[in-house]
Image (tube, rainbow, N blue to C red):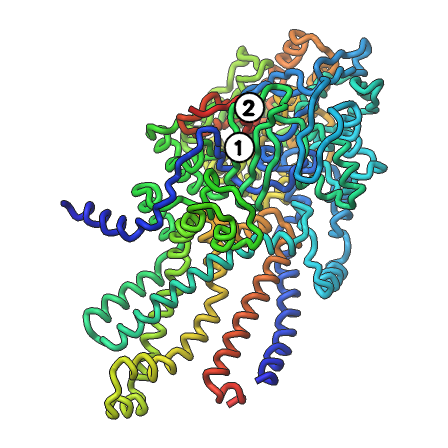
Amino acid sequence: MNALTLFRAAVGLGLAALLLGSTAASAKTLVYCSEGSPENFTPAINTTGTSLDAARPVFDQLVEFERGSTNLKPGLAESWTIGPDGKTITFKLRQGVKFGATKEFKPTRDFNADDVLFSFQRQFDEKNPYFKVSGGKYDYYNDMDMPTILKDIKKTDDHTIVMTLSQPNVAILANLAMDFATIQSAEYADYLMKKGKPEQFDQVPVGTGPFVFSAYQKDAVIRFKANPDYWGGKPAIDDLVYAITPDPTARISKLKTGECQVSPLPRPADIPELQKDANINVLTQPGLNIGYLAFNATKPPFDKKEVRQALSMAIDRKAILTQVYGQAGQMAKNLIPPTMWAYDDSVVDYTFDPEKAKAMLKSAGVSGSIDIDLWYMPVQRPYNPDAKRMAEMMQSDLAKVGVNAKLVTYEWGEYRKRIQNGEATTALFGWTGDNGDPDNFFFFLGCDGTKPAASNIAKWCDKDFNDKLAQARQVTELDQRKKLYSDMQVIQHDQEPVLNIAHSLQYEPVRKEVIDFKMSPLGRNQFDGVSLK
Amino acid sequence: MIGFFLRRIVLTIPTFIALTFLTFVAIRLVPGDPVEARVGEHGITPERLALLRHQLGLDQPVWKQFLDYGWGLLHGNFGTSLSTSGSVLTEFMTLFPATVELSLVAMALAILIGIPTGVIAAVKRGSWTDQILMSLSVTGYSMPIFWWGLLLVMLFAERLGWAPVGGRIDLIRFDYDTPTGFMLIDSLLSDEPGAFLDAVRHLVLPAIVLGTIPLAVVARMTRSSMLEVLNEDYVRTARAKGLSPFRVIGIHALRNALIPVTTVIGLMTGSLLAGAVLTETIFSWPGVGHYLIDGISRRDYPALQGGIMLISVVVIFVNLLVDVTYGAINPRIRHGG
């Protein structure tokens, strides 16, 4: 008997009394180690992925993303037709769809057009009694430019909704699949308003989704039960438990010990060890994001495209990929990741060539050394794990071609505000896609984005690019849209307002007893269709 | 006694006012504001920024915001969380029992092990036992909580499987209401077989981690205090009178030696709550620690202000209690002597 055995035996005896309860898992309960508490359970007023994940089991949208992809499929709308002028969309609603119940509220009717009207009107109509409830901030609705896009919404009968747009915009369908466009129960809203407890509407959710909300303890647990009446069929798991575990190390430990079966957002440093674990599958896929370096086209010498191209060739992105992203990055040559249908693989990437960069700078009239500022984010973002390190590497590369880059940063909110106001000469930034539509990426280089406080931090406005951006919103034929986006990728590459650096990879460790969990390119976690061995 | 108590209470009023002011100002000195913290890469139009700031009252002069906040406090209103729109007081009170439960058990552990350890070390002053115990207490005191916690999790949860990694109860096996928020009590009330033991299993590692530093402090404090007392004339007299060593040490000496230890225990409430923030993070313990950290990252002014204020109330109250206890033990203090 060696010392370790003795030690185990001794401590084992001491703790024996505490071991009576073993962690025998019910075969039908799936535990997901979520990374935080939700702000509340109404997606329209939430801003974080954590909150949206927490509400998703309970709700549906008119249009939905196929699980594990950004392809659209019918949700609470069985079908839709776009009018000949492209400005009206008519949705035929699914019939016989039941809302879940709570301890005190039992729905008396099925889902209908009133629920759709209520869910949208709450977000823009100040007369809606719920407009100001729970703070009344509808960030996503505003961020996705819905107040401009959506001119009117009305019902023509209980199962038909007509949306009128201010101008043709096919990308709105992808918007409608987003969580902010979740459909909630108007009857439940009325019930709570009459009871004088409207804020409960956002805390105890009632929806038509695959699961029914059961309980929530802040920072501890969210419980859901399978919805036996779900229009898409009862989920394969009976109970879904979100064990709230903010610390990434604790999440991994819990996954290893089987205290949870799915654990999001692992730290890159933990990936190799998890990949060796016989009980865990580490799923991976390219994220729907882009990390880039923007050149401010309104500030000399970056008003010349040759200078922007030269600097793009002076930066060793392969070294950045290795040292900043490790295993978790994929070199980017286009603004959109290769998993998107509009990706143009024929674009030839810039190569790392400092000598050519020097020559190009000289021919562009930039002789001798120049001083620029290079801004970097003070925080980790999904598309850039270490902006400071990246900026330092760029600074070193640029010095070799005679460009002295002064590194600048601010507190994150301040940083974002200043670069969006055009203060930086060059700045690291990025984007994470909301809905998988290419428009949701290309829009941020549009001319509208050059206004102060808007998303185009290169402040680059190209008429050709902008016209094609507008056109791509109006055509419904996929091939035509693809051609337009392809042209835009060529223009962007030639004009180089931003140097595309990388698309980060996403990882999701899942225990092997979990069947058919699909990673979402949008970073969603959803559990309908998932089962357990 | 009542006069002493009232005097102490009156003295806490300026402390509260200063605390309210400091918390209010300090949070606003941190760069960034709640609206900016909500905005991501999408950006925000100046009009919408102004609208949201107006909705949250952030467009008011700071002195007016402070007066409004103070007025609310006087009416028991700690404000509304900017991120959840829930009442700060309600949210805090939901989470606070978990922190209290963990802290009480950790402190009980520190006292029950720390005091006997200190007494043994003092009685056996200079011996190997003394040196080993005091070395252990220095080690315990110097150990970073985060490192210590992770070490225990890796050994007892991951490697040996004797304890759970985190949380307060096995979420798969048990699903019951928690009316008091104290899991040990709620598990007993639930009538679910095995729930209480499971709650204890979940409490063991976090309590050890949180209790380690107080344990070391209590042990060292008890030892030095005991050494002082053991040299006093009355102890020598008691020994000379032939009293048993147990009576001399356990009753005559220890009672007086405990006076400074009691004070230290009161003062440690603050550091215990600070330690709870880290311990709660390591063990996914749903207490107020994470609430405050989340408040900082989201620039949730009301949540942060309210949370800090309420914790301060507890710390001040505990110290008040200690002062009263101290006064009860030592009448000279009670009379201002």
Residue at 42% x, 34% y is A25
Marked residue chain, label 2: A
Q: Which residue is mark 2?
A: A235
Can residue A297 be seen here? The reply is: no
Residue at 32% x, 46% y is B156
Are there few (<14), some (14-19), or many (20+) residues within 10 Å of tag 2? many
Q: Give the quarter of the image for residue A414.
A: top right
Q: Position of residue A415 (x, y in %)?
A: 61, 42
Residue at 79% x, 13% y is A86
Depth check, front residue: A161 or A65: A161
Image-based side of A428 in relation to A113, left or right: left
Q: Position of residue B161 (x, y in %)?
A: 33, 42
Depth check, front residue: A63 or A166: A63
Q: Give the quarter of the image for residue A44.
A: top right
Q: Earlier in the sequence, mark 2 or mark 1?
A: 2
Q: CB of mark 2 within 8 Å of CB of mark 1?
A: yes
Q: Is residue A181 above or below residue A91?
A: below
User: Type of residue at label 2?
Assistant: Pro
Tell me the distance, in whole angstroms, between the alpha carbons under discs 2 and 1. 10 Å
Q: Position of residue A286 (x, y in %)?
A: 50, 23
Q: Position of residue A143 (x, y in %)?
A: 70, 32
Q: Secondary structure at mark 2?
A: loop
The disc at residue B308 is none
Image-based side of B83 in relation to A122, left or right: left
Q: Secondary structure at mark 1?
A: strand
User: Type of residue at label 1?
Assistant: Leu
Whether discs 2 and 1 lie on one chain: the answer is yes
Can residue A116 be seen here? The reply is: yes
The disc at residue A240 is 1
Marked residue chain, label 1: A
Q: Give the quadrant of the C terminus of chain A.
A: top left
